[in-house]
Image (tube, rainbow, N blue to C red):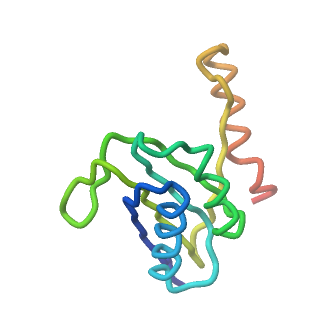
Amino acid sequence: MSTYVGIGFSNDPDTAKAAQDAADQAKQNLHSSNIDIAIIFNTVHYNPSDFIPILYNQLKKTRLIGSSTAGILINEKIEKRGIAVLLMYSDDVRFEIGYVDNMHLQDLKAAGTQLTKNCVSDYGKE
């Protein structure tokens, strides 16, 4: 039983090319054709609505989570511009994603309850 991780990064100024290159590198470094989850970090230079569809299609419509950031720590330095893609596949671990839209506008206890239900809903009887 194993867990595999592949990391890719690009700071190409062209958003589509940066997304494509980072995903290609991550897939190559994963050493598996299967992807369970993708974690994406991008600096503010890239609009998520421009690159998320590219990554979603290129990564076989896998689950994506991510965040924008002021910098990306990679290769012992901080990149101030770029898109980083981390892919994971595991024989041992199961990944699911849950979320609640506009949590700040809701009663926090009710939103927390809904988030918990969303996080575990795909596990079924497990």
Q: Quadrant of residue 55?
A: bottom right
Give the quadrant of the C terminus: bottom right
**Which residue occupies 65% across, 69% down?**
58
Residue 67 in the image: state x and y as whole percent.
48, 43
Question: What residue occupies the far front of the structure in this picture?
Answer: 14
**Which residue occupies 52% across, 61% down?**
19
Q: Quadrant of residue 1?
A: bottom right
19 up-or-down from 29: above or below = above
95 up-or-down from 98: above or below = below
Residue 88 in the image: state x and y as whole percent.
53, 69
In front: 61, or 115?
A: 61
**Which residue occupies 67% across, 15% down?**
106
Question: What residue occupies the far left of the structure in this picture?
Answer: 76
Residue 116 in the image: state x and y as whole percent.
66, 37
In front: 54, or 103?
A: 54
Residue 14 in the image: state x and y as whole percent.
47, 56
> Is residue 50 shown left or right of residue 124?
left
* Total labels drawn: 0
> Is residue 100 shown left or right of residue 20?
right
> Is residue 1 shown left or right of residue 43?
right
